[in-house]
Image: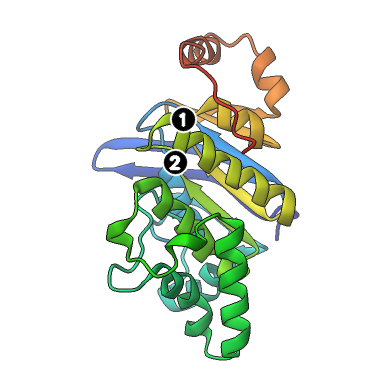
Amino acid sequence: MSEHFIEFRGVWKSFDTQDVLRDVSFHMDRGETTVIMGRSGVGKSVSLKLILGFLKADAGRVIVDGQDVTEMTEEQLNPIRRRVTMVFQAGALFDSLTIEENVAFPMKALGNVKRDDVDQRVAELLEMLEVTPFAERLPSELSTGTKRAVAIARALAQNPDAILYDEPTTMVDPLMAAHTGGLILKLKEAFHKTSVVVTHDTHLAKRLADKLIFLHEGEVGFFGTWDEFEKSKEPFLRNFRLQDELIPALDVTG
């Protein structure tokens, strides 16, 4: 059905009388990191929710790993959501579970993973995401940035084919944003999983993007590599880049 891992074909999405996405088409290939950028309200996070079926397209098709998810039921979407997982802005951790228990939850939910294997995998992920010291704490005891790192560890726990990140460096201070970006970069280099990153942070995008989608006024204003994005003379892209240059860059390599 599609040679690409994720594909939007002429997708429309409106809320009330406002068109958020208008005849949007793009694709994301297996093993690559695709960054979606654009100003507020242009449909970046909406695109992620369409991929997972949390929202339904008004028209057009959304294809995930060869399957048309556009009109799937919740039951049909469950296998897709086990293979494509999302890291939400707020983390969406279970408040009553420790950090260790949160990360273990997806594996335990499968019901066919040995306890020793769960414990080993959790320990590996906590170390990789640099949150081992917080293993016995509750989410309420952690900073926003640390909760986001734990959410990434939990997303990786079920060994998905793809991970969707919704504004992973927003609502944290610049140092934590750089640290979080460094962790995502480390995961990209370690696992080469298909990743989609929604962000307004061009410094992060430059580090991560194999391909960049820039949404503008409900449409795809740009689709290509970062080098092509920087060379583009489109006025709205130039203005976006110039505005962002006022924000100092931080090293996100960790």
Report the side of 139 relative to 118 (left or right). left
Q: Position of residue 186 (x, y in %)?
A: 66, 47
> In this rendering, is residue 248 above or below 142?
above
Q: Quadrant of the C terminus?
A: top right
Name the residue: 55% across, 10% down.
238
Q: Are marks 2 and 1 in contact (CB under 8 Å)?
A: yes
Residue pointed to by mark 1: 200
Residue type, numbered disc 2: Glu
Residue 246, x across and y down, in percent: 46, 11
148 up-or-down from 66: above or below: above
| Residue sitting at x 35%, y 47% | 144
Within 10 Å of disc 1 (Cα), the crowding (few <14, some 14-19, many 20+) is: many
From the viewer's perspective, tell me whether residue 4 is left or right of residue 237.
right
The quadrant the N terminus occupies is bottom right
Q: Amino acid at mark 1?
A: His
Q: Is residue 175 visible?
A: yes
- Establish if 148 lies above or below 118: above
Q: Which residue is mark 2?
A: 167
| SS under mark 2 | loop
Say which residue appears at 29% left-offset and 58% top-offset.
141
